[in-house]
């Protein structure tokens, strides 16, 4: 899942970026509100973490612009502004969740997981369940019929995305845009490699290939 982090506190961002990457997010990091306003409009992010006190342009203004342009991506606001009025202002501007600094980084991860599930109408729990496969996000492992299946970080990231979009036809370019950040090469051959590995571990029919169109998550049930 591709995530945009907009945070001008370098020390905090240096802590959050690797944490988010370990939890299966492809992270792009920006520090300036002006850059963020353009970046989120031009790229298909699955979720955004937005600080309010930004150089260049205030986070509230950026969020208002996104919503005015019909950008529906879920936004979690980070801020050192702890007054109730500031919270209301952020929510009115279109924030989906709010986290006040200082905070524990693990709380951010849990809030993002909950926000992603809510966005995809998935029950608020730590385990995704689709197509006969259970995916434990905390442990980053799957199970089929109660039998555990170990996953690499890239396999976990891809399987989670498929399970959040069951039955949807996803092209290679779509998967590349949502599974990799701007710093990583978006090679369709790498996508095919990870899909084949998931098939070997979970079953040949778990992901259907539609020639010239893309891939569709079917799960283990036939």
Image (cartoon, rainbow, N blue to C red):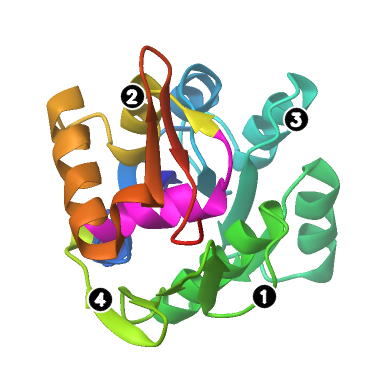
Residue 118 quadrant: bottom right
Q: Is residue 77 magenta?
A: no
Does residue 67 lie above or below 53 as drawn? above
Residue to which mark 2 is pinned = 172
At 41% from the left and 73% from the top, the residue drawn is 137
Q: How many numbered callouts? A: 4
Report how far apart the C-alphas of labels 2 and 3 lie in the structure: 28 Å
Q: On the rendered structure, is 127 left or right of 149?
A: right
Which residue range is magenta in the image?
Answer: 155-168
> Which mark is first along the chain, 2 or 4?
4
Instruction: Give the mark nearer the N terminus: 4 vs 3.
Output: 3
Q: Nearer the viewer, mark 4 or mark 2?
A: 4
Mark 2 / mark 1, whichever is N-terminal: 1
Q: Real-space Cα distance between discs 4 and 3?
A: 40 Å
Instruction: Kindly report which numbered mark, 4 or 1, lies closer to the viewer in this rendering.
Output: 4
| Residue indicated by mark 1 | 124
Q: Is residue 148 above or below residue 200?
A: below
Label ID, residue 149: 4
For label 1, the SS is loop
In this orientation, which residue lies closer to the viewer: 148 or 180? 148
Return the x and y of residue 8 as percentages of the image width and height: 37, 47
Give the foreground label among 2 and 1. Answer: 2
Tell me the mark number nearer the camera, choosing from 1 and 3: 1
Classify residue 37 as left or right of residue 162: right
- Dot 1 or dot 3: first in sequence order is 3
Disc 1 + disc 3, Cβ < 8 Å? no
Question: Which residue is at the front of the view, 215 or 121?
Answer: 215
């Amino acid at each position: 899942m591709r995530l945009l982090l907009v945070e001008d506190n370098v020390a905090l961002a240096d802590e959050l970026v690797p944490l988010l990457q370990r939890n299966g997010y492809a992270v792009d990091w920006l520090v300036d509100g002006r850059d963020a306003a353009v970046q989120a409009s031009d790229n298909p992010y699955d979720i955004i973490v937005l600080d309010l006190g930004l150089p260049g342009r205030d986070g509230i203004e950026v969020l208002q612009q996104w919503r005015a342009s019909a950008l529906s991506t879920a936004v979690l606001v980070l801020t050192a502004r702890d007054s109730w009025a500031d919270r209301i202002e952020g929510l009115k501007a279109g924030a989906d969740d709010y986290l006040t600094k200082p905070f524990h980084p693990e709380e951010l991860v849990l809030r993002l997981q909950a926000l992603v599930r809510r966005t995809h109408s998935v029950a608020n729990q730590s385990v995704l369940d689709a197509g006969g496969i259970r995916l434990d996000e905390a442990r980053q492992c799957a199970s089929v019929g109660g039998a555990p299946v170990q996953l690499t970080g890239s396999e976990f990231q891809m399987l989670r995305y498929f399970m959040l979009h069951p039955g949807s036809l996803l092209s290679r370019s779509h998967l590349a845009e949502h599974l990799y950040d701007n710093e990583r090469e978006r090679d369709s051959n790498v996508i095919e490699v990870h899909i084949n590995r998931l098939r070997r571990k979970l079953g040949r029919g778990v992901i259907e290939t539609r020639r010239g169109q893309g891939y569709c998550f079917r799960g283990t049930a036939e």
